[in-house]
């Protein structure tokens, strides 16, 4: 995703009953980071789910959960590569100015608005992002982000 | 990653001015990017152009030199909404070129996969994209505040379509389990039967969907238009049949390019298709329904009659939302029938070899939004020499422009905002997929 605003990094939910949802795609450089972090979390016994970002899929996945976190790469030219940001999506969703005209997906804010209207938000919903600029087709993930993934896992499990 | 874009609409036309311009940079709730240019003098529409400016995607060129077996996975990437349609037309064209006969079970399972895609695509369009037009909401989020049970029903129906594609296609979007000759792997009979309860729920609630959408107010529009679809002797068409029309077209898919031509117009990156010496035509649910009504199961015909829907020479494209809902009911009914009928175990595919000599294959199948034609020429080493793909939105472009011309003329008295909304709704009657056609609304209206 492409974003513009971040809140101070702070984790405030326990990993009890946590569902971690990784967003992204393979073979698109650092866009794979969400899936990579999932693999690390799965080894720690966390329930995980891969998603390509379809909003309806996210609503289905999280609507009966208490504690959910999303993990995604963030295209960000302002922050150093590897910067980890956290959003509490229930209180302060990112001001991303994202507007998708595709019917493939609802953008994140529309997804949150629809889920809220339908009463299908989890009790806790966090978004973790790692800043990068590498999304070239066919590229593999950068070593720096793999290294940062360990730090992100610690933050999620804290 | 999402793209950052802006959407703008011009202010309403000043009263009494000689010229008026309406501008909507991008049309929401259609797939892809384009614009509409409308030039009017009073009620006379002088020019209407559906401008598809999304760049060409060159899929036919991408296919050249690749092995024939790669076509289903490459063409599936043309569209996230109707990848199954691309896979189906591709595999049937390859099998036609290679002389492959699939088993009756594989044929049934391909119909089942298509059921899943029709449900996914039609329900998404009905509930999230088109219903807000009729109920005068900005989008589904606003609509959900007043129509929560209906939106919940739509999400559930779509989910059950997704389940079919997930199980048989390997994943919900861009399935990976389709191959020339069949499927890479087949789920067990138990896994298929586990879908039945949800599919039966879907069948019942598809009927509620039909009753709901048929209660909408429909703008007046009556079009006498040539309608084209596949026709099969015994079935409502998915994967095979002759290409027919209500004005006498009756050809094999291999004759498609001798009867139908494409031309490039300056204002669109998607080619416009027309029937030789006749002109524009319509593909999609309305055409399928009118040309194949007798092939629908009794249940679907009975529900259609109950909402006063039957094949007629003139159609109102705004009522396509009802036909789409009828096809959702058909797809649930058909999926249940297939799962209850198919026998297991069955081989998942038949072996396919490259051709002994250069070979050409043709196929047309029914994508959710209309007939989708593929042609491939394959070399003896199995590589694709050339490919031709004619998607439904390309075929509907001229008809959409004609609809817009009539709608704008009849409703010239409306404010710019209201006319813009009505024009967008007119375009959405076709559930256009510009990603496929090459990908869509900026409305510029000039009043002389």
Image: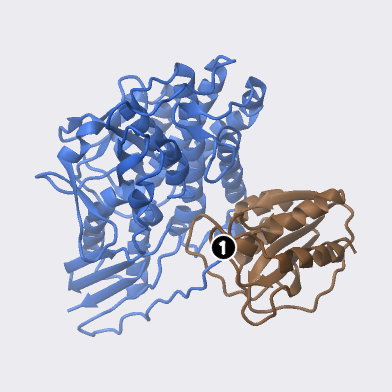
Chain colours: A brown, B blue
Q: Residue at x 37, y 72 (%)?
A: B24
Give whichever of B365, B374 is nearer the camera.
Answer: B374
Instruction: From this view, report whether residue A74 is shown above or below residue B171.
Output: below
Answer with the quarter of the image where residue B403 lies. bottom left
- Residue A73 in picture, x, y percent from top left: 66, 66
Describe the element under mark 1 as helix, strand or loop: helix
Label 1 crowd (10 A; few <14 / some 14-19 / many >=20): some
In x, y percent, where is residue B129?
Answer: 47, 55
Write the residue at 35% across / 57% down.
Answer: B438
Residue under pointer 1: B142
Residue B55 position by quadrant = bottom left
Which part of the image, by quadrant, shows the N terminus of chain A?
bottom right
Viewer can see residue A70: yes
The image shows residue A71, relative to residue B309, as above or below, that is below
Q: Is residue B47 left or right of residue B158?
A: left
Q: Measured from the top left, where is residue B298 in percent x and y?
A: 41, 22
The chain that hosts pointer 1 is B
Q: Residue at x 57, y 32 (%)?
A: B168
Query: On screen, A53 above or below B95?
Result: below
């Amino acid at each position: 995703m492409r974003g513009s605003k971040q809140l101070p990094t702070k984790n405030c939910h326990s990993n009890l009953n946590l569902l971690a949802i990784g967003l992204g795609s393979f073979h698109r450089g650092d866009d794979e980071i969400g899936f990579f972090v999932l693999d690390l979390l799965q080894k720690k016994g966390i329930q995980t789910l891969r998603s390509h970002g379809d909003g309806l899929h996210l609503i289905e996945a999280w609507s009966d959960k208490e504690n959910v976190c999303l993990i995604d790469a963030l295209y960000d030219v302002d922050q150093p590569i590897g910067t980890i940001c956290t959003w509490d999506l229930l209180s302060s969703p990112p001001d991303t100015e994202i507007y998708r005209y595709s019917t493939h997906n609802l953008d994140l804010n529309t997804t949150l608005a629809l889920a809220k209207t339908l009463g299908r938000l989890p009790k806790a919903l966090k978004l973790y992002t790692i800043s990068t600029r590498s999304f070239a087709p066919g590229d593999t993930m950068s070593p720096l982000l793999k290294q940062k993934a360990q730090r992100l896992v610690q933050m999620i499990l804290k | 990653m999402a793209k950052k874009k802006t959407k703008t609409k011009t202010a309403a036309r000043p009263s009494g001015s000689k010229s008026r311009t309406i501008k909507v940079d991008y049309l929401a709730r259609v797939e892809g990017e384009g614009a509409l240019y409308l030039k009017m003098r009073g009620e006379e529409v002088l020019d209407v152009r559906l401008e598809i400016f999304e760049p060409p995607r060159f899929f036919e060129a991408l296919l050249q030199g690749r092995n024939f077996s790669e076509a289903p996975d490459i063409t599936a990437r043309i569209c996230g909404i109707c990848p199954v349609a691309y896979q189906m037309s591709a595999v049937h064209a390859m099998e036609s070129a290679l002389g492959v006969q699939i088993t009756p079970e594989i044929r049934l399972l391909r119909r089942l996969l298509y059921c899943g895609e029709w449900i996914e695509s039609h329900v998404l369009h009905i509930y999230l994209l088109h219903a807000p037009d009729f109920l005068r909401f900005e989008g589904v989020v606003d609509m959900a505040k007043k129509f929560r049970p209906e939106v919940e029903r739509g999400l559930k129906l779509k989910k059950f379509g997704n389940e079919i594609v997930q199980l048989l296609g390997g994943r919900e979007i861009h399935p990976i389990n389709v191959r020339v000759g069949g499927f890479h792997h087949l789920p067990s009979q138990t896994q298929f039967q586990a879908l039945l309860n949800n599919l039966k729920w879907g069948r019942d609630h598809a009927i509620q969907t039909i009753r709901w959408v048929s209660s909408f107010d429909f703008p007046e529009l009556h079009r006498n238009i040539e309608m084209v679809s596949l026709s099969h002797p015994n079935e409502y068409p998915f994967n095979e049949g002759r290409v027919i029309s209500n004005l006498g077209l009756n050809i094999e898919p291999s004759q498609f390019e001798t009867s139908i031509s494409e031309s490039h117009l300056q204002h669109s990156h998607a080619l416009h298709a027309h029937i030789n010496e006749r002109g524009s035509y319509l593909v999609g649910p309305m055409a399928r329904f009118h040309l194949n009504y007798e092939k629908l199961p009794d249940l679907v015909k009975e529900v259609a009659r109950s909402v006063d829907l039957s094949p007629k020479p003139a159609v109102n494209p705004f009522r396509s939302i009802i036909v789409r809902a009828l096809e959702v009911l058909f797809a649930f009914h058909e999926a249940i029938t297939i799962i209850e009928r198919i026998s297991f175990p069955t081989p998942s595919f038949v072996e396919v070899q490259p051709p002994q000599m250069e070979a050409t294959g043709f196929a047309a199948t029914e994508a959710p939004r209309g007939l989708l034609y593929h042609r491939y020429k394959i070399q003896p080493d199995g590589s694709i020499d050339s490919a031709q793909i004619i998607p439904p939105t390309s075929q509907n472009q001229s008809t959409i422009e004609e609809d817009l011309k009539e709608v704008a003329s009849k409703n010239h008295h409306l404010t710019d905002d209201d006319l813009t909304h009505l024009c967008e709704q007119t375009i959405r009657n076709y559930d256009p997929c510009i990603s496929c056609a090459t990908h869509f609304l900026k409305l510029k209206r000039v009043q002389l």
